[in-house]
Structure formats: structure tokens, C-alpha cells
Amino acid sequence: MRKALIFSFLFLLTASLLPAQESMHTVEFQYAGRSVLVPKLGNRVEVIPILALIGAGAEYSLSAGTYVVALGEQRLQFTPGHKLVLANGVLLNTKEAAVPSPGGIAASISFVDQSLLGPLGFRLEPIPQGYRIAPGARFADPVSVRPAAADFAATTTLVLTLDRATAAVAEPAEDGGIVVRFDDSSPRLDPTARLQSRRVRSITSNGREVVIKTSPDIGLLNSHLLDDPPRVIIELGAVIPKPTPAPAQALERSGPPPIVIDPGHGGKDTGAVGGNGLTERDLTMAVAQRLAAELEARGLAVRLTRDDGEGRALTDRTALANRLEAKLFVSLHANASTFSSVRGAETYYMSLDAQATDAAAAATAKLENEAGEASDERSDLDLILWDLAQTSALNESAELAVAVQTRLNALLDLRDRGVKQAPFVVLTGATMPAILVEIGFLSNPAEASRLARPEHQQELARAIATGIEAFLR
Amino acid sequence: MNRRVFWIIAAAGVSLALLVWLLAGPGRRVVNRQEVVEIDALPTPTPAPEQRVMLLFGGSDGMLHPELRSVPMPAEVHERVRMVVLEVLAGPTGDLQPVVPWPAELNVVFVDNKGNAFIDLSAPPEPLTGSHTELLLAYGLVDSILLNCPELTAVQILFGGQEVPTLTGHLDFSRPLVLNKRFIAS
């Protein structure tokens, strides 16, 4: 009898738990009057049924390992096991990764909400039996943004101070101005902040981005993030060079425009290190000081971007040259290669990618169209002038590079590696002829020994100074 | 055990079953509205036809040199980018040198609808130095991809799942790079 009772009790208990089994292994998602029970795997859920519920198609590229999710114009890509999502052309770093699962791909509820449904324009709302998918993205914790601006002669430095660290990227907006995108954060502008700038028209937030409207022809020169306190530094300036020179009264600098010499690396960043222990940081400073003395002896004003031993952000170096309205910007570096046989000097100037050029031209045309007053002839003329100015600036940098490289080639035993173009960070946004000189390879033992000799450093400085002087004549 | 104990245990069992059913029950009320979304089985890969690709590696002159190789090239662009990058990471077969100077793994391949490819490599285990190292790495990969995937216009390289402003303090890695043949030996 006792056994029968225990058996009956266990039978009843098991039978009663059966309905709960499915709900313990599934989560219900509702959208537009429909619902689906989605398999649950630990703290993750199968993703494909959720995407299917909102009408999004998911394709898997088997050998590339990439999922492509499409919903109308929206397009997401992600790879199982990796914390990256490409959402409508914008890279997002996610806190966690989706993982392979029996149904294809599984992810946590927060990943589904913030990294998949959010970029597609949806959000998850918890309900007793699971989640309801609602239109309208909901983003993560708010971040307070306090803007401040300082106008200089040719540029404006805009500082967005944040109340907590978060990833942010400043990019030129398609309709002009600048957009600052915040990863996984909803920016809220500090309503008490007051901002005055002749190059900034307005700053607004749409919940995901800070949108900065600028004065005509003013755009993003460069930007970077700083810590303690966390802030986004944005350098604004003329992105469409004017064919007419700036008025004299706009200059705030005293004395003649200097030549800004940038000794590469600095501080804890030693750069390349030769087998003889010579560091790029110390070598470029030694040559920069000798070059400054050479140029000053020839009656030219000079300014260095850093002191001995001090580090400085790459974008700050160009910004300094822009603020000083420098005549020229010359960045000095020493090279390193995995091939120890490679040696010689080379000089670089900025490469404007075809895409960037096209984008800027398109932005110019759009600005003109939006103005509504400009005739087609004026738009065409401005585009031609802009193109000429860009070409002129690049041509000047190319001429300076050739002048310097020619003198470096004349040095005994210095192999000519030529003049080349590449998108170097330190040359980005420079508003004057700007070059980067690689004075030799520290990875080549013979060249490293020669570079360590003070007399050779003096020869290099003299050769570069002669090239600069020839360009300025 | 008497009849009274039996009924107490039976009542407790039924109560417990009722409680569990009530807790789990509401979700069951929508059964008539549920849909079952069929999950297709993963497709079986079909072998892609072999095609000659041009891959770029470093030469002793410090320039990029082409190496021709026949590899299976799928039609889908993500897969072709992955194939080219894996071949570049595998290194040259002749006298040339690898352009990625550490045993990097390819984590992610994305392609947007503007013709930009994004590739994520495992980060270098130690800091690299020299613009030459940076330039050969960048254009060895970018040019190899763009020369073999003509529908693409630019490639952004990420390291360790992160967008990096620069790798050794020179080249701008924060945006996609376009084809640059200046580093390919003529």
C-alpha cells in the first residue's frame, strides 16, 4: 500500500511538471499578434526564429562563417564567436558574441535586443511569458554629453565631455556637418551647457547620435577619444579650401608662420628600436633638433611638436601645425622592416583616397543644392575650385617631398626608396604642405650604426633643410 | 498508513500539480497563435571551381611582389575575401616573405553594400614597429583582396575585434583603404 501511494504521488508530480517542461526550454516571443516559442539554450535563445518573426531573412555564408541578416534596407552581419556586428555599414563592438547552436545561431537576450533588433529598429519588452518585440530601438544606458568649443584662427576644437567612458566615433554626416555615434549608449546633451562658436551652428542628440551642424564649408578635420575625464575631441576646419587667402586680421599667431617639425613617436612610445639599442623616439628628436637649428640659421621660424621625452597624440601634432598656420609640416621617422636587408630613405605625402575625394565632392554638391540659391554654374565652379585647391595642396606636398628626397638621395650610401603616397594619420587634416620623412631603417644593422653617428644625423638634417629651403624659394 | 494519510498525500500532490500548472500555464494559452518556424539544415558546401589568384608578398627589396596561385574561388564575395585572406596569411610558397609577421587568424569577414570589406585578424602578440611593416601588411592584404574581388572598392582591417587608429603609429587603419599599387614592385 505504501509503495502504491509513493508511486501515485511521484506519478502525479511528474505529470504536473510536464506542461512546465516546454516553457523551461522555450521562451515566447510575440510580434504583431503572432508568437513563436523559441528554444532556450542556457541563458541564450535561438536567434533565427526571432528574426523570422519580424520578417528578417538570415543567410549564412558557410565558408566565410558570416551571417547576413536583411530586413528591407537594413542589413546586419555577424560571425558566431566574435564580438563584432556590422550594422548598416557601421561596426559595433558587442559585449558578448552569438554562438553556433542546433538551430544555427544562439545569443543572449541582451545581444538579441541591443545588437540585432536594435539596429533593425526594434526593441524587446518583457512580458510574463517571454518578450514582446516592439517597433523602435531602445538603446543602453544614457551618457551625458557636455559640449564646449574653442575657436582658433583656422580651426575650432570641439570637446564633448562624457560622464562615463564609452566608445564614440565622429564621422562626416552625409548631409554636411558631423555625426558622433555612440556604441551601446544613448547620448543626452547637458541642457546647462552653453556653447559659442563661429563654426558650429547647432548640436543636437537623436538618442543614438550627437549631430553637429557646422557653418558652410566647415567639416571634420580629425577626432580622437581621451580619458580622465572621458571626452571626444573634434577638430573642425575648412574641408573645402577657399581659393582666396585668409584675411590678415584672422591670424592670431605672433611672428612669421613657422615650419613645424614633428619628431616621430615620444614618451613611452619608442617606435622602432635598432639592434644597437637606438630608438626611433630618440633618433627623430636628435635629427629634429639639428634640423631646427639648420632652418633657424637660414632665417626660418621653427616649432617642434614635442619636447625631449614627451609623447603627443598623432592628431594633436597636425592640429598644432594648423593652429599655428604653419608654412610646412615635416614629420620625421626612422623605419623598421622584417627584412633586415631593406635600407634607405623615403618621403611620403598624403594620399587622398578616391572614395574620400568623391564623398567630399558629393557633400559639396549637396550643400549647394540645399542652399537652393546657387545656380548649377556656381556649383560646378565651386567644385572645380575645390578640386583645384585639393590638387594644389597635394601638388605642393608632392613638390616638397621630391625636394627633400632629392637631397637625401645625394647623401653618400643612402639608397633612394623614392617618394610615395599613403594615408598616414599624422598627415591627415594638415592644411599646409605636409610630408613624412623616413630617414633610414633601424632594422638594417649597417644603417642603424650610421644613424647613431651624430655627424650622419647632422648630414640628414642639412639635407632635409636644403630641400625645404629649395621648396620655399 | 490509513486512508486519511492517503488522501492528505493525494491532495498535496494534486495541489502541487495545480500550482505548477498555474505558474507555467499562461504561456500555454497562446498555443493556438503559435507558429513553428522551420529551421533549415545547414547547407552542405559544394566545391568551388579553381581559379588563378594574384597574392602579394614581401620581397627583399622591401616591395610587394605577386605570386600566382590556383585556389578554389567561390562565387559569393564573403567567401572569396576569406579565401584570399587565408591564402595571404598562409604565406608565400617561393622566396618571398609573409606580409603579416605573426601567425594571425582570420576572425571575421563582413562586406557592406557600398563595396567595403571588413576583415578582423587576431591581434599581434607583440607591438610592431616601422611604417614599412605597416604598409606591407596593409597593402599586401588590401591589394590582394581588391585585385581578386573587383566588385569591392576598399578594405578595412581590424585587429582583435577592434578598429585601431594605427598599428605602428603611421598608417591610418580607422577607415577602409583603397587599392594602392605604389608598393607593388614594377
Image (tube, coloured by chain):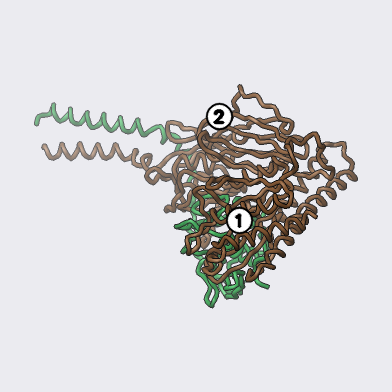
Determine which quarter of the picture holds residue A210.
top right
Which badge, 1 or 2, is on the more N-terminal residue?
2
Up-down relation of residue A102 to residue A411 (above or below): above
Quarter of the image that includes the N terminus of chain A: top left
* Residue A472 seen from this side: yes
- Residue B51 in sight: no
- Of residues A189 and A18, the one drawn nearer to the viewer in this rendering: A189
User: Given the image, on which type of amino acid does mark 2 rest?
Assistant: Ser
Q: Chain of mark 1?
A: A
Q: Is residue B151 above or below residue A212?
A: below
Residue at x 61%, y 73% (from the top left corner): B66
According to the rendering, which colour does chain B have? green
For the view shown, which residue lies furthest in the bottom direction?
B94
Chain to which mark 2 belongs: A
Residue at image x 48%, y 39%? Answer: A29
Which chain gets the brown colouring?
A
- Residue beneath label 2, please? A144
Kindly state the secondary structure of the residue where label 2 is placed. strand
In the picture of the structure, the residue carrying the numbered disc 1 is: A287
Graded by Cα atoms within 10 Å as few (under 14), some (14 to 19) or many (20 or more), the crowding at tag 1 reads many
Provide residue A412's location: percent of width, then percent of height. Answer: 65, 70
Q: Locate the C terminus of chain A by quadrant.
A: bottom right
